[in-house]
Image (tube, rainbow, N blue to C red):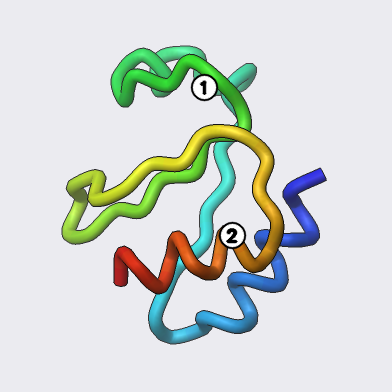
Amino acid sequence: MIAPLLENIATNYEGRLKVAKLNIDDNPLTPPKYGIRGIPTLMIFKNGVVEATKVGAVSESQLTSFIDETL
């Protein structure tokens, strides 16, 4: 489950990163807009533009590296 991991990331990166979750069942038009074909899909946006995307389950260290490389 990725939710606890995202909560840790939100706390650790508070003030530098905003974490948001989207339920694709409740928002079926959003995945095609961003080319999302698998879940979980993690996306980093800067000024409303997708800067990086990672698809699939990841460990906390992998997610931290992904974020640090993008920020």
Question: Can you say whether 18 is above or below 15 in the image?
Answer: above
What kind of residue is marked 2?
Gln
For residue 62, the mark is: 2
Q: Earlier in the sequence, mark 1 or mark 2?
A: 1
Question: Can you say whether 19 is above or below 35 in the image?
Answer: below
Give the quarter of the figure containing the C terminus: bottom left
> In which quarter of the view is residue 29 placed?
top left
Disc 1 to disc 2: CB gap under 8 Å? no
Question: Can you say whether 60 is above or below 28 in the image?
Answer: below
Give the quarter of the figure containing the N terminus: top right
| Mark 1, residue position | 27
What kind of residue is marked 1?
Asn
> In which quarter of the view is residue 16 placed?
bottom left
> In which quarter of the view is residue 11 placed?
bottom right
Residue toward you, 51 or 61: 61
Q: Position of residue 69 (x, y in %)?
A: 34, 68
**Residue drawn 49% across and 44% down?**
42
